[in-house]
Amino acid sequence: MAIINQIKNIKIKQGSSFNDTFIVKDSSGDVQDLTSYTVEAKLARGYASTHTRTDFTAVITSAAAGTITLSLSDQVTDNLDPHTRYVYDIVITYTDSTVTRVFEGIATVDPGVTI
């Protein structure tokens, strides 16, 4: 079965550490085994943006369970503009260099008061 691209909007709290978990599924809704895959994810101010790209720390936390975890440090989220709509995506790469987008969505940043 083919891996599906899922939509998931995320919220990031400015000045706080961000962590979220994603489960990759195939077109039947079954969990996709991510053994032999690598993962990367980026955050940007818009789809056409060529600057202001931010790399998430992206880790396959359980290959058999199809689980990916994304994180950003509090220092990184502190520099995000809460008045800007961000977009993100997650791509996986198989050992044969096939690249597949598995998640995408809008990222909103909740402003901080203390930070």
Image: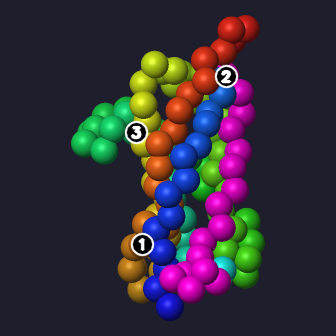
- Label ID, residue 44: 3
Residue drawn 64% across and 83% down?
30
In primary-sequence order, the first of circles 1 and 2 is: 2
Q: Tag 3's secondary structure?
A: strand
Residue type marked 3: Ala
Q: Tag 1's secondary structure?
A: strand
Looking at the picture, how far across and down is residue 15, in whole percent? 67, 22
Determine whether 33 is above or below 52 in the image.
Answer: below
**Visible in this render: residue 36?**
no
Quarter of the figure with the C terminus: top right
Q: Based on the displayed image, in which of its 4 quarters is residue 32 positioned?
A: bottom right
- Label ID, residue 15: 2
In space, the residues marked 1 and 2 are separated at their CA atoms by 31 Å
> Would you say the residues marked 1 and 3 are in contact, meaning their CB atoms lie under 8 Å apart?
no
- Magenta-highlighted residues: 15-30
Residue type marked 1: Thr
